[in-house]
Image: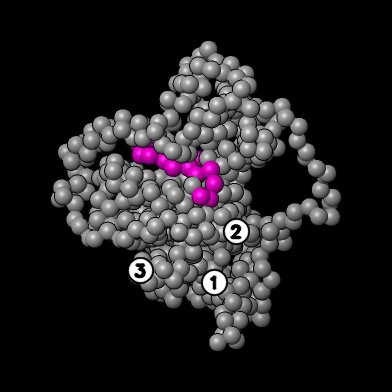
Amino acid sequence: MQKLLLLGDEAIAQGAIDGGISGFYAYPGTPSTEIMEFVQHSKEAKEKGIPCVWSANEKTAMESAIGMSYAGKRAMAQMKHVGLNVAADAFVNASITGVNGGLIVVAADDPSMHSSQNEQDSRFYGDFALIPVLEPSNQQEAYEMAYNGFEISEKYNVPVLLRVTTRLAHSRAGVETSDKKTQREMSLPKDPRQFVLLPAIARRNYKRLLEMQASIKQASNESKYNKYIDGADKKTGIVACGIAYNYLMENFDGNCPHPVVKISQYPIPENHLRKLRSECESILVLEDGYPLVEKELRGFFNEGITINGRLNGVLPRDGELNPNIVAKALNLPFGEGEAIPEIVKNRPPSLCMGCGHRDVYNAMNEALIPYGDGRVFSDIGCYTLGALPPFNAINSCVDMGASITMAIGAADAGLVPAVAVIGDSTFTHSGMTGLLDAVIKNSPIVVIISDNSTTGMTGGQASAAKGRIVNICKGLGVDPDHIRVLNPLRKNHAENMAIIQEELAYNGLSVVIPQRECIQTAIKTKKAALKS
């Protein structure tokens, strides 16, 4: 046993390693990225031979983790909240197949959308899939939940969802580790048809999942992570979920005068909540995310007690919580501080100086002048910053891979030519199938795969596309005469702009691939070379 100073993400990684995991599977996405990065730099994980290579996307990560569970070993799939949308097919069905080896799915949510398209709450996925959900209130619990989560998974024969939010994922605290568990031996499922979801088997498995719900609910009632903490002031009872419990306690130096139900394991602990209902005049629900518990309580108690929270405006309907917001809801004094002077206000993010995407947008914008604005569909990556000045180059960013398919639809509507801008990692994540659609229809679009040889937006992780894009495009059926590779440098501007112009004039599918290493990874590579 030792004490370590860890990020919430790192605590999850270490807890899983100590808990006997045999495989990590993930696609980088803030705020979950540091889990896999910690494992990749862990000497212990390397010595134990634990696989920890980035997957092509969250769906493949989820399915690989299910495959390891099938073989009887413990696995973890990690992703940010919108990544769970990508993995949802496999995720939901995994509750029907059940598990063999323990399976934990980590979803890192991003209230306030610090680096995301939405602030969806992954607890709803856990509720939808009828599986236990763990939501730590601090880094120690994050470690313990990863450490013990495999046993919960194996006990109830279902995956376990471990949900964290940005503030917990990216803040540090001391964590006491536990004794290290050995990895499980490989063993195939006792029921050889457990993972075969033909309708007859799926119906049987689903009935078994439903029958397990009473035990899963009872486990929440008895969980050490769920507590009823008595208080003298019964006028208001408080339900505090996950990290919101910390925000509450910060206002009272750890001694809240109100009765509190702390929730860190779901389904909701009905025994504690009934006790709170019987003793208090009103209930305030604190949860960092959507009002999942608040909605459940409104149905659970039906009427006769006031339930305050995000739904009635006592707390903001959007954004993450913080101690000041909680204080305001409790009519406590709080300090908002001085207004931020104009000179130090946040500046919008911008592409790095020397970034190849800059040269891509400059060439593309000039080539598009004869066609007018509003015809560039982009995707999710650091190149999305091309939507901002001085480029003002793109007109959409919806979800991973949507640039190509939106361009197809726009071209079908008569917007010809349409342009799709997608990065190399995003292309292999979820752009390849869209390109296949474009090949089949010979859509009159230009697909620009801006290749910087890394997953730049999340810190420079390895890209599954590196060295493969041209061959992938050929394999999908793109006409080799309309696969154009560029070197996006300022000195090549005229040449690159002319090539894009040629492909815009072509009445069919073109793929333009500007290739230049990310300036940040190039700097790191150069520094590493100098050190060696």
Q: Earlier in the sequence, mark 1 or mark 2?
A: 2
Residue 196 tag number: none
* Residue 98 can be seen in this image: yes
For disc 2, the marked residue is 384
Q: Find residue 380 and report its horizontal and vertical position in percent.
A: 54, 57
In the rendered structure, which amino acid carries the disc numbered 3?
Lys
Viewer-nearest residue: 85 or 81 = 81
Disc 2 element = helix
> Label 1, label 2: how many angstroms apart (C-alpha)?
14 Å
Q: Residue at x 67, y 77 (%)?
A: 490
Disc 1 element = loop
In the rendered structure, which amino acid carries the disc numbered 2?
Thr
For disc 3, the marked residue is 48
Disc 3 element = loop
The answer to whether residue 296 is left or right of residue 331 is left
Farthest front residue in view: 1
In the rendered structure, which amino acid carries the disc numbered 1?
Asn
Residue 452 tag number: 1
Q: Which residues are magenta?
A: 120-140
| Quarter holding residue 350 | bottom right
Q: Nearer the viewer, mark 1 or mark 3?
A: 3
Q: Residues within 10 Å of mark 2 (few under 14, many from 20)?
A: many
Q: Residue at x 61, y 68 (%)?
A: 357
Work out which quarter of the rendered image holds the C terminus and state it: bottom right
